[in-house]
Image: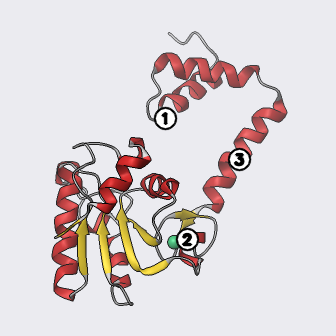
């Protein structure tokens, strides 16, 4: 039975589709929205639409940005010959917070995961191969440590090694299965500095 107006039910349904949002929270958020002023709700909707419309992939590193080339790729203070490969823009942000990494990044937007049907062509590997034609001295693979991240790291290693470019992998100081985003800066730096040639 539908206790609510169809409009409310639909709102609850949409919130329920968001990651980590269960049925109760979806209801709470829907009613919160209905209790806000028209202006607040319009503002919220506008911010979401703007973000979706304006944000796209950096033409170089593939991170999410509202410019053609992101601020890191366009900075002349960054060492373009060192590319750190990460799974997500959030992982990249985690390394940026350490304030110690001076190279650039490449964001894959995922990892190879045969169980979920995510293959080589479903993540941004082609774009990485393209970048290797430039002046690159080292590729640091910082995919998450775990089955998918390891499979991706191995694939990248086999891809980069024959080109003569140095390939390293972040050290196992990062807990297995650990989400890079949730790891503190000291641990991240230790993993980066302890990287091992593959
Ligand atoms: Zn970029």
Residue drawn 40% across the image and 48% down it? 186
Mark 1 and mark 2 in contact (Cβ < 8 Å)?
no
Of labels 2 and 3, the one closer to you: 2
Q: Is mark 2 within 8 Å of ligand 1?
A: yes
Displayed quadrant of residue 11? top right
Determine which of the numbered discs, if any, sits on residue 47 in the image: 3
- Is disc 2 placed on a helix, strand or loop? helix
Indicate left or right for 1 with 159 as reference: right
Task: Give above or below for 106 relative to 8.
Answer: below
Real-space Cα separation, disc 3 to disc 1, in angstroms: 17 Å
Chain-order first, disc 2 or disc 3: 3
Residue drawn 71% across the image and 47% down it? 47
Alpha-carbon neighbours of circle 3 within 10 Å: few (<14), some, or many (≥20)?
A: few
Real-space Cα separation, disc 2 to disc 3, in angstroms: 24 Å
Of labels 2 and 1, the one closer to you: 2
Alpha-carbon neighbours of circle 2 within 10 Å: few (<14), some, or many (≥20)?
A: some
* Residue denoted by label 1: 18
* Residue denoted by label 2: 72
Nearest to the observer: residue 98 or residue 129: 98
């Amino acid at each position: 039975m539908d206790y609510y107006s169809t409009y409310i039910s639909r709102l609850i349904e949409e919130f329920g589709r968001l990651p980590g949002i269960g049925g109760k929270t979806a209801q709470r958020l829907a009613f919160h929205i209905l209790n806000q002023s028209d202006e607040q709700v319009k503002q919220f909707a506008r911010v979401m639409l703007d973000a979706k419309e304006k944000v796209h992939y950096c033409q170089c590193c593939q991170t999410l940005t509202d410019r053609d080339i992101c601020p890191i790729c366009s900075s002349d203070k960054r060492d373009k010959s060192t590319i750190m490969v990460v799974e997500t823009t959030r992982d990249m942000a985690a390394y940026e917070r350490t304030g110690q990494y001076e190279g650039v990044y490449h964001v894959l937007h995922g990892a190879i995961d045969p169980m979920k049907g995510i293959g080589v062509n479903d993540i941004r590997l082609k774009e990485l191969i393209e970048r290797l034609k430039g002046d690159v001295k080292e590729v640091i693979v910082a995919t998450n440590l775990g089955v998918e991240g390891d499979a991706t790291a191995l694939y990248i290693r086999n891809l980069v090694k024959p080109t003569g470019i140095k390939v390293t992998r972040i050290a196992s100081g990062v807990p297995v299965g650990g989400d890079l985003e949730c790891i503190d800066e000291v641990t991240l730096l230790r993993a980066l500095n302890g990287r091992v040639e593959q």
